[in-house]
Amino acid sequence: MVANIKDIPDIQGTPDTRRIAIDHVGIKDLRHPVTIRDRAGEALPTVAHATMTVHLPEHYKGTHMSRFVQILHEHTEPLSAATFGKMLDSMLERLESDAGRIVLKFPYFARKSAPVTGEQSLLDYEVTLCGEKRDGQRAFYIGTTVPVTSLCPCSKEIADYGAHNQRAHVTIYARVDGPIWIQDIIDLVEDAASCQLYGVLKRPDEKYVTERAYDNPKFVEDMIRDMASNLDAEDRIRAYTLECENFEAIHNHSAYAQIAKDKDVD
Amino acid sequence: MVANIKDIPDIQGTPDTRRIAIDHVGIKDLRHPVTIRDRAGEALPTVAHATMTVHLPEHYKGTHMSRFVQILHEHTEPLSAATFGKMLDSMLERLESDAGRIVLKFPYFARKSAPVTGEQSLLDYEVTLCGEKRDGQRAFYIGTTVPVTSLCPCSKEIADYGAHNQRAHVTIYARVDGPIWIQDIIDLVEDAASCQLYGVLKRPDEKYVTERAYDNPKFVEDMIRDMASNLDAEDRIRAYTLECENFEAIHNHSAYAQIAKDKDVD
Amino acid sequence: MVANIKDIPDIQGTPDTRRIAIDHVGIKDLRHPVTIRDRAGEALPTVAHATMTVHLPEHYKGTHMSRFVQILHEHTEPLSAATFGKMLDSMLERLESDAGRIVLKFPYFARKSAPVTGEQSLLDYEVTLCGEKRDGQRAFYIGTTVPVTSLCPCSKEIADYGAHNQRAHVTIYARVDGPIWIQDIIDLVEDAASCQLYGVLKRPDEKYVTERAYDNPKFVEDMIRDMASNLDAEDRIRAYTLECENFEAIHNHSAYAQIAKDKDVD
Amino acid sequence: MVANIKDIPDIQGTPDTRRIAIDHVGIKDLRHPVTIRDRAGEALPTVAHATMTVHLPEHYKGTHMSRFVQILHEHTEPLSAATFGKMLDSMLERLESDAGRIVLKFPYFARKSAPVTGEQSLLDYEVTLCGEKRDGQRAFYIGTTVPVTSLCPCSKEIADYGAHNQRAHVTIYARVDGPIWIQDIIDLVEDAASCQLYGVLKRPDEKYVTERAYDNPKFVEDMIRDMASNLDAEDRIRAYTLECENFEAIHNHSAYAQIAKDKDVD
């Protein structure tokens, strides 16, 4: 029976005797509005799913879950490399831990111009930002899923006319070093697809993207190699996992490829 | 404090005074292995998500949730129109209700032959079976999502070569009368697509499906009209909602169409 | 071979001879940033999935898909009953149709104060806005999924101590008439749960919500009846489908109930 | 123009000059019926999502996607450690690769007896089997998500009565060595939860699980430590990632913890 607020026991603060440290403990999938600073300098409002965790040494029984939520509420500035780093520091300070991780997943919108008419529209990309501190070192990761068109070279070659093509998802998750924008990474991917996607296409644009894809047939193997080649040439990307999934127009399953690389190790 | 099992009170059985009947009450999304009797007479094992509900008159406080689960466990026969009807009757009897509904959603697998080489493989379809009793009347519904290829007539016409195409999902949910197989409904849909899908295609098959889709360009409007026309001609289908969604290869959104019809009313 | 833009044929504009009208045709699941005007008068930025469709008479071959996307891009004002109606009108005018529907689904965030400490935080709700015009009549719908706590009266009664409780989702989809805010509907639901949820709870708040749920045990049947009773008393809600799903803490399936009502018909 | 089947070119077989090997290439998310051999010796039919990939050396342009599907169709024996290994070998042989991976995800059903009445019912678990060969070494992984009840010690301590509890998901992904059954791993997890789940509970059982959870309050930190302790003591588990996610009854987000360990390295 608890008489007043001060007497409410702090169970999480009591010592633990199992001698097992916890790598990550915190909150998962808290949905929250955030603002992203984009390459053009604009502040883009969006909605994130946040997962925030800290390392818990073996002698602590528990962490303080409500503090994670408070930190998310306090950081109202547009997210950039600088402000995201500040948020990571606040979290470690408030949770009294020397290691932790913040992961934010949100849709990002880029303004694109249709290839012939120049008609403007937005395209949405799923983006993940991850900031991590461990052993006194900070690491930042950017992930994004870029939807593109892939057109099958085999189908084009063997058929008298036409070629099956489809939407494909290219997912990159990269450890980055130095200032790099989400849009920089998207550009490296879109450049190497059979064709990129657009929100609005007028008829002359549709003619263009149809022919462009037909002129650039690529297997899932070709797409991933050309994209890996682009990522290899970009010094600010230090390590990456790159996946390409084609939602085959002729099957009910996907063609899939993956390449992982760590430039600082391999 | 409860002394023995007989003394445990039956809260659900007490009367209710709010005077509000509940249309459907029961269990939702219970995953359970089931067996389906298919058109070829074979018993196909699969896994269903079951939702089972009954009508609760205003003077009853609650239903008995565990009985729904028991009924599902007791019915081990392959599902057909006959056994599904028996299961519906058991449920109403055990739950002491005169109205109720069973909905089972599961993947269904059809054996298909590749169009040129005849190579056999399975294709998966999402299927919903629904049996309902109300006002002394029984009704049965079959739903299925059929994945197909759609090829854009506009893209074919305006481009010097090629045409964008993609996987599309056709979803039909039909009130049926008389014996009709899941496969019968799938056939009506696949027949009207730019091309149907297959699990395995060898190169001569891939040539065939590429050319077939190019020879049968269809807007989402064409697909849905041709499929509606097939459903209209099938007397065992008394009412339907038909949806077609093209996962556009050139956009990151879908083209979509819907037609609903009740032959016994319209 | 197409010489210039004017010569690109307009396939969608040609006549159709199948004599089948299409109830709804357009675009589905286009993700787009939107702003919502909330009850407090603030403009809340969020991200919507948009589905926009029009009726297509039997003599038209197709609709013009890119126009839907353009309309969404042009409407940049915060969404309210008034601006949403304007958007619906624009769509029908631009698509030259006399019937159509716009559906927007997005997360909505409400600022809440913890029940004892008053600590402020956001809670997220899934919301659907639907505007429809048909036969010269307009109809507006608001849907929302409200996460709440439910605590089982049977468990409380039969156990010597404790009672199983869990997160539950209450989903209401209502035809509304007259100005009503998303928050008004959320209030009607939260008021009738065992307890409502919060983003941040300090220890005194956690004590409060634990005891409050224990003091308000409700079966899924009780929750839905109490909520239906609240909806019945609200005149601006003309029709509704109300669902309650308890993600049972003691099972791997849900307890579920549904009530549907149309005050202008029943 | 292709005259006959033999003349259809084999594009995938041509050499590649980009000098980039592909870690994994193949098919993803092919849904297929499979049978699992369980601990009791029974063959359990279920439905898997299969992802099958091989390593592609830098000098090969592409792999042969249809062969993966054929291998899946050919292996009709109940899956056990032995038959799964055979399937992996067939894949590598047919795809002419010396490294590859098969991942199967499917619902697994265990027969459980209610704790007091002994009433039998099934409980479903999400399971992942992964077999991998690389550098002449084979490795096998078993993953499973076990749904359990967690009850909050803080809530129990500070409240005069009751305690919030909820469904939680414990996900383990383990590298195993030696014969170990899915059920063995499930047992290690369920043993350390506040309480385990059941498909059917009669009133005496519900009384039991309510009191058992109240008698075993565990933070997400306690659950993961007790489970890690169980996994540490099991020699056939050589490495693991263990995650615990509590779908908090009082919040709309999860409490989360993760521990990873490699006994052969750490």
Image (spheres, coloured by chain):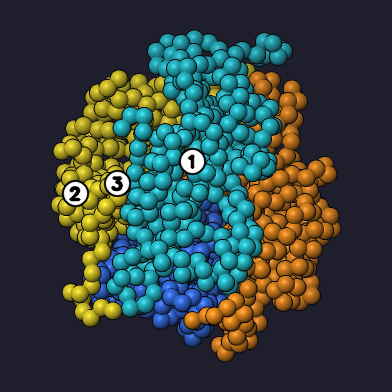
Chain colours: A yellow, B orange, C blue, D cyan
Question: For this view, does D30 lie left or right of residue C32?
Answer: right
Badge 3: how crowded within 10 Å, few (<14), some, or many (20+)? many
B61 shown above or below D64: below
Chain on which label 2 sits: A
Chain on which label 1 sits: D
Residue type for callout 1: Gly
Residue C78 pos. (x, y %):
33, 63
Residue type for callout 2: Ser
Asked if marks 2 and 3 touch (Cβ < 8 Å), the reply is: no
| Disc 3 from disc 1: Cα separation | 22 Å
Residue C50 pos. (x, y %):
46, 55
Question: For this view, does D148 lie left or right of residue B132?
Answer: left
Residue identified by numbered label 1: D143
Which residue occupies 69% across, 24% down?
B205
Which residue occupies 58% across, 46% down?
D107
**Marks 2/3 same chain:** yes
Residue identified by numbered label 3: A20
Q: Nearer the viewer, mark 3 or mark 1?
A: 3
> In the picture, which quadrant includes the C terminus of chain B?
bottom right
| Disc 2 from disc 1: Cα separation | 30 Å
Residue A108 pos. (x, y %):
34, 45
| Disc 2 from disc 3: Cα separation | 16 Å
- Of callouts 2 and 3, the N-terminal one: 3
Which residue occupies 75% across, 54% down?
B76
